Image: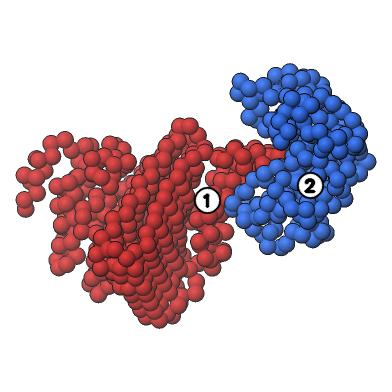
Chain colours: A blue, B red
Amino acid sequence: MLDIRNLHARIGDNEIIKGLDLTVPAGEVHAIMGPNGSGKSTLSYVLSGKEDYEVTEGSVTFNGQDLLALSASQRAAAGVFLAFQYPVEVPGVANMTFLRAALNAQRRTRGEEEISTPDFLRLVKQKAPALGISQDMLRRGVNVGFSGGEKKRNEILQMALLEPKLCILDEADSGLDIDALKVVAEGVNALRSPERSMLVITHYQRLLDHIVPDVIHVMHKGRIVRTGGKELALELEETGYAAYGADAA
Amino acid sequence: MNAEPKMTSRPTRTPAEQALADMLSAAPVSEAGRLGELRRAAAAAFVENGLPHRRVEEWHYTDLRALLRTVPARRAATSTPGEAVSFPNAIRVTLANGEVGPLPAELPQGVSLLTLADAIASDHPLLQRLGAAAPALYDAPLALNTALLGAGLVLHVAAGVKVARPIQVAQLFGGEAASVFTRLLVVVEEGASLSLIESFEGDGAAYLDDTVSELFIGDGAALDHVRLQAEGAAAIHLGTLVADLGRDARYDAFVLTLGAALSRLTVHGRFGGTGGHLGVRGASLLSDKRHADVTLFVDHAVAGCESRELFKTVLADSARGVFQGKIIVRPDAQKTDGRMMSQALLLSDDAEMDNKPELEIFADDVQCGHGATAGALDGKMLFYLMSRGLPREEAEMLLIQAFAGEAVEFVADLAVREVLTAHMTRWLEERHR
C-alpha cells in the first residue's frame, strides 16, 4: 500500500525528515510515536502534499503510484486522507457544501460520476449521527465555532464520507477529554478494513488503548529508529523517549 | 458672467477638462427658477475647479485629472445595445446609451414613474428634491451631471405603499463611444417601502457614464437598493449615490462592482431624523488593470441612528481597489452606532488596495468602529481544501466566494442575491479560463 524509502524533506533550510523508511501494508494500522520535534507532523504533511515542504531525496510509492508527483488534491483522489491535528476553520463555506464539493471533486478526478443530491444527503444522514454531528454543524461554516472535540469528529466524518485508502491521523487525541476520545476512536475503528491502511501519529500511548495498532514505529530526529508490536507503546509509557535522547516530557 | 477670468486662472486645463468645458458651453442652461440656478451654479463650479486630482483629499487615490485622458462627445445613440440583465419578478425600465426606453405599461398601485424630461417640462413638484440632499462641497462628477443633466427618471412611491416587486432601472451602453449623464430621483414617502435595482452594463466601447441617483426615504420608510456595475472593459463609470433618510427610515444598499476600466462610486448617506438605519455593503471583483474606487460619506447629523458598512474587494492581475469611508458623528448625534469594515483579498502581487476608513466624532456617547484588512488567500485554508480533493482552482474559487459572500448575504431578496452570485461566479470562472 504505502512504501517510503530513504525520504528526506525540509522546510526552508531546515531538514526535518532525514532518511525515513516505512512500509504500511493494506489493512494494517501503524502507529508512529515519538517526542516533540521528531518530525511526525512533517511526515503527515509531506505525505498529503503540503507545498511548504520540499522533498530532497527518496521516494514514496502508494499503490504503485509515485505519490510525490501528485498535487495535494490528486493525492486525496488517489485515497490519501490526513485528519488534521488542528482542523482549519473556513468561514463562509458551509460544512455541507464543503463535504459535497470534496466528494465530487475526488470523483471527477477519478473519472467517476458525481453523487446526486439525494444520495449525498442520505449518505450524510447515515454517517453523521454516530459521530454526534448535528444538522447545525453541517449548516455552519467548516469548523467555524466548533469545539475541539467537534472539529475532530468533523474530521472523522469527512474520512467516513470520502472513504480513503490511507488515513493519516495526526495527534487525533490532542485536546480531547476521554469521552470525546472514545467517540473519535470508535469512528476510526469503524473504518478499519482489509483494504484500508492507517497511520496513527501520536505522542502519547493513551490513544493506542482505543485505536489498537498492528505495528508501532518510534520516530526520532526524522527517522524511524525502532519498530515493534503494540507492546512497544507500554514500554514507551514506562521509559519515555529518554532512551532516544529526548526530554522525558 | 464672471466665468471668463476664472477660466484663465487655470491655464493647465487638460484635454478632458477642455472637452467637458466645451460640452458645457455647447449646452447652456435655459431653465429659469431653482433648477436653472442649480445647474448654472454646477457648471460654474466645474469651470472654476475642473477635475479633481491627487491633492484633493477625497480623490487622492483616484487622480481623475490624470486618469481621464479623453472624453467622448455627447451624441445620439447610433445603435441599440442588447438585453439588460434580468432580475426575477422585477419591473424593468431600460436606458440605452442614456435614452429612456418605454415606461412600463402598468405599475403597482401608488407607484409613479416619469421621465426627467417630462418632469422638467411640467415643472413637476418632485423636482424640488433634485439636488436638495446633495453635499454642499464641490464634487466634479455630481456637478457635471447636474450641469449637463441628460435623460433620467423620477420614481415616486406614495405614503404607506409597500411595493412588492423590485423596480429595475437598467442602463445599457454600446456602439459608438459617447458621454452620458443620467439622473435618477427616487422618493419613497412616509411608511412606504421599495426594492430598487440599478444595473449598468456595456460593450467594449470607451464610453463615459456619469450617473447620479438621489434617494429620499421618508419617515418610517424603507428602501432596499441593489446596484450592479458591470460596465464594459474600456468604460469610465462615475457614480454618485445620495441617500437622505427620514426619522426611523431604513436604507440597505448592496453594490457589486465588476466592470469599467475606471470606476468611482461616491455614496453620501445622511440621517435627517432619529432612529434611522443605513447599511451600505458591497463587493468588488476586479481583474486586468481595472481601477475601482468606492468612497463613502456617512453623516450622523442627528442622534440615535445606526450605520453599517462592509466592503469586500477581490483583486486579480494588476487591478487596483480603493475604499474610503468617512463616518461623521456631529455634536448632537448621541447614541450613534456606526461600524465600517473594508477587507481586500489580493490574488496577485501586482494588485493594489488602498484602504482609508475614517471616523470623525464630535459627540461623546457613541459606539463607533472601523477596520480594514488586506491580504492574500489563506494558505492553511487552501491546503485544507486541497487535502480533501478540491483542485487548487476550485479551492481558490470557494474561498473567494466565501470571502465576498459575507457581504452579498445582506441582500435580503434571495432571487436578487442569486443573480448577483451568478455574476460573481462568472467572474471567477472567467479568471480561470
Residue nearest the viewer, comparing B163 with A11: A11
Residue B24 drawn above or below residue B197: above
Q: Residue B240, percent across and down?
A: 32, 55
Helix, strand or loop for disc 1: helix
* Chain on which label 1 sits: B
Residue picked out by circle 1: B404
Instruction: Say left or right for A120 vs B55.
Output: right
Residue A20: tell me if it is visible. Answer: yes
* Chain on which label 2 sits: A
The residue drawn where x is 25% and y is 60% is B362
Between tags 2 and 1, which lies in front?
Answer: 2
Q: Residue A41, percent across and down?
A: 71, 34
Q: What type is the residue that disc 1 sits on?
A: Ala
Image-quadrant location for residue A249: top right
Residue B199 drawn above or below residue B58: below
Instruction: Say left or right for B93 vs A220.
Output: left
Residue picked out by circle 2: A159
Residue A187: tell me if it is visible. Answer: no
Image-quadrant location for residue A2: top right
